[in-house]
Image: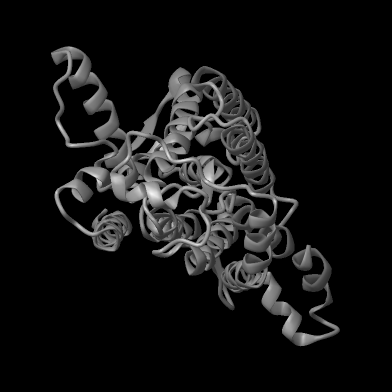
Amino acid sequence: MLYHLLAPLQNVFGPFRLFRYVTFRAAMAGALAIVLVLLLGPVLIRLVRRLQIGQNVREEVPERHREKAGTPTMGGALILASALSGIVLFADLGNARVLIGLGVLVALGLLGMWDDYVKVRGGRARGVNKRTKLLFQFLVAAGVAALLYRFPADPNLRTCTNLPVFEKVIIDFRWFYIPLVMLLIVGFSNAVNLADGLDGLAPSLLVISFGGYAVLAYVAGALLTFSSYQLKLSEYLRVLFVPGAGEMTVYCLAVAGACLGFLWFNAYPAQIFMGDTGSLPLGGALAYAAVVCKQELLLPLVGGVFVLEAVSVILQVGYFRATRGGRLFRMAPVHHHFELLGWAEPKVVTRFTIVAALLAMLAVATLKVR
């Protein structure tokens, strides 16, 4: 909004030219999101406590988590409101990729809010029926995939993506493109939900992951203008140039800023949880950012800890059924396994965050390896 209002006035007031630059607007979107979360956090916590919207703790979690019952939840609404504010104010709202991204946050956010409401008011610790939730997630993901296919940023790259590390190697998914987009959005929506089991874990990982994709989005869509020529940063780094993808830098840093601000209240011991209201849309938005900047194949690396959490649950369930009661881990998701090994909750969060940062750095490093 501010981009459309102030950038055209640069001849009237010189500093308004800053709004032409994605880097400036992305930084401002992230900063605004942090400030909004810090200002509104105490208000939301008091409101949620007054409404008695507290966390229901499942019976199978470690014993030490039982004391968290009743902690205010649905804090994801604060993350979404702050991130959306940053995006709407500083992104180019004429960019279709940004508008679709806003739709992902809102649609999956409503699903998460419904799920949290059922948990709290309905007294069901597991929330909405799994099949119902998955159906809604797949419908949202199918809509996003169809829009990206029908209105591509570049028709020649409609179903293509970069192959990491290898120079000038492009993969065309063809008919598998829409199922792939759906699988990534639904998969990461649920993976982040699984990782949201320790104080500060999910928002810490999301800050790093969205920060990594802010860099990748900027590289994919940056068009650097010099006095006599223009340079596509993507051409220099041998990746696909995606028109308009640079605006996703604003999107990613706004979400990263909101998650970073939320850590102020969610760090151990947590004053509020994000709940499914936050985890479902943020996971879907991360996958969406990967698809838009044509770096889908780096998503398992950038979001490697989320993948680890999801895979640990799949393996645990599969092994349990195959052996009729056997267990690979003491408890899944895997963060609970380390808790039961004797690691303190803050130590698990810190070490997982270090691993996530390392993986994100490796993902960004692949740009130069090409």
- Residue 93, horizontal then vertical, whole percent: 74, 53
Residue at 17 percent across and 37 percent down: it is: 330
Q: Is residue 26 left or right of residue 93?
A: left
Q: Is residue 258 left or right of residue 320?
A: right
- Residue 5, horizontal then vertical, whole percent: 83, 68
Q: Is residue 109 left or right of residue 64?
A: right
Q: Is residue 291 above or below residue 2?
A: above
Res. 285 in view: no
Q: Is residue 210 above or below residue 312?
A: below
Which quadrant of the view contains residue 180?
Answer: top left
- Residue 129, horizontal then vertical, whole percent: 53, 21
Nearest the eye: 3 or 104: 104
Which quadrant of the view contains residue 27?
Answer: bottom right
Task: Work out which quarter of the rendered image holds the N terminus and state it.
Answer: bottom right
Q: Residue furthest bottom?
A: 14
Q: Is residue 23 above or below residue 51?
A: below
